Image: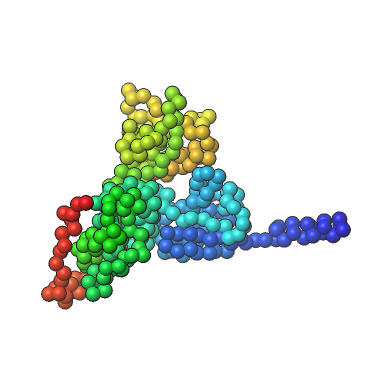
Amino acid sequence: MASALAAKMGLNSLRRKQAKNFNVRITTMDADMEFSCEVKWKGKDLFDLVCRALGLRETWFFGFQYDVEDTVAWIKMDKKVLDHDVSKEEPITLNFLAKFYPENAEEELVQDITQHLFFLQVKNKILEEEIYCPPEASVLLASYAVQAKYGDYDPNVHRLGFLAQEELLPKRVINLYQMTAEMWEERITSCYAEHRGRTREDAEMEYLKIAQDLEMYGINYFPIRNKKGTDLLLGVDALGLHIYDPDNKLTPKCSFPWNEIRNISYSDREFAIKPLDKKTDVFKFNSTKLKVNKLILQLCMGNHNLFLRRRRVDSLEVQQMKAQAREERKGQNLGRNLERNQAMWGGQSSSGCAGWRL
């Protein structure tokens, strides 16, 4: 009996050693994909495969996120996928998400697929109330989301109730006012009707241009303590580092723009932000969890690198992407102008969304 058990255990061990592949499910904001990966693959091997499958060339914004304990982590590109603290139950699930945000979406996002993934991620964060959005902006954003999905408004097709199954507004906004679902739909539709002629790409970009001005857009928050032991929040984003009271994520107590930071050091769980101005005090803080410290470091380095990159001349690859995108959009605009000229006598009148207030 013992020998049979030992033989079985030996066989299972042999099978594991012989396994050369494992299955991964990649969840994007748009769809799920599954891949068979080699055991020896590093994060970059899988990342390159996914980016090729998506047709994504603006890879520097994105990464693989996974849950670990009560926080999140990102797959390191130079480390084997299976060497991370991911669940080893197959298929291993990783979330393909934007890790870094642009300073200016219209100037920086070149490919339609990049823009689309950002649009979906930002929209989700607004609806989940991870980004605070005031009521007026929420309605306008919802109208652009409807334009992106349904195209031009047609009163014969888009009748009252066509948005009944859509999640378009944060629950906080809905609960602020004594309005029925039909009343909200009328408000959104009155704005939606004004967006005639905008393509999905146009509507998504308009959404991002509004969203990027929201105070919580693109910020990762971390609970920290200063050297006096006071509980605070650290915000890390494309522009720099920000310190908040725990009960106010909208207005920072102080900020350290990237171009005003000499360096950020880390030792024995303590961070030190050293400003360029030597007359300004060094700001020291700590986080209680090592995994969170690592995430803070990653986000600081990545955001700072992109900050510097934006201030250099575009690489040849980016120049080529931008030139190709301009040509493609020029062709799209010609097509839209032709359609608009053909239908110029059948246009809809504006309903005055821009001046509407709750």
From the viewer's perspective, tell me whether residue 47 is left or right of residue 261.
right
Taking the view exactly as shown, the residue that stands out farthest to the left is: 345
Residue positioned most to the bottom: 342
User: Is residue 346 in sight in this rendering?
Assistant: yes
What residue is at 45 percent from the left and 64 percent from the top?
A: 31
User: x and y percent of residue 260 in the render?
Assistant: 33, 33
Rendered residue at 61%/54% (across/down): 88
Residue 60 visible from this viewpoint: no
- Compared across the picture, whether 98 is left or right of 8 comes to left
Query: What scheme was used to colour the molecule?
Result: rainbow
Above-or-below relation of 204 to 310: below
Quarter that holds the N terminus: bottom right
Percent x, y for residue 97? 44, 54
Instruction: Tell whether 191 sits left or right of 132.
Output: left
Q: Quadrant of residue 160?
A: bottom left
Q: Nearest the camera: 259 or 250?
A: 250
Q: Residue at x 59, y 52 (%)?
A: 87
Residue 151, quarter of picture: bottom left
Q: Choose between 197 and 257: the one closer to the eye.
A: 197
Above or below residue 349? Residue 317 is above
Give the side of residue 303 with respect to residue 77, left or right: left
Q: How many callouts does the rendering have? A: 0
Give percent across and percent down for residue 344. Answer: 14, 73
Residue 216 horizontal/vertical position (percent): 34, 44
Q: Residue drawn 36% across and 65% down?
A: 165
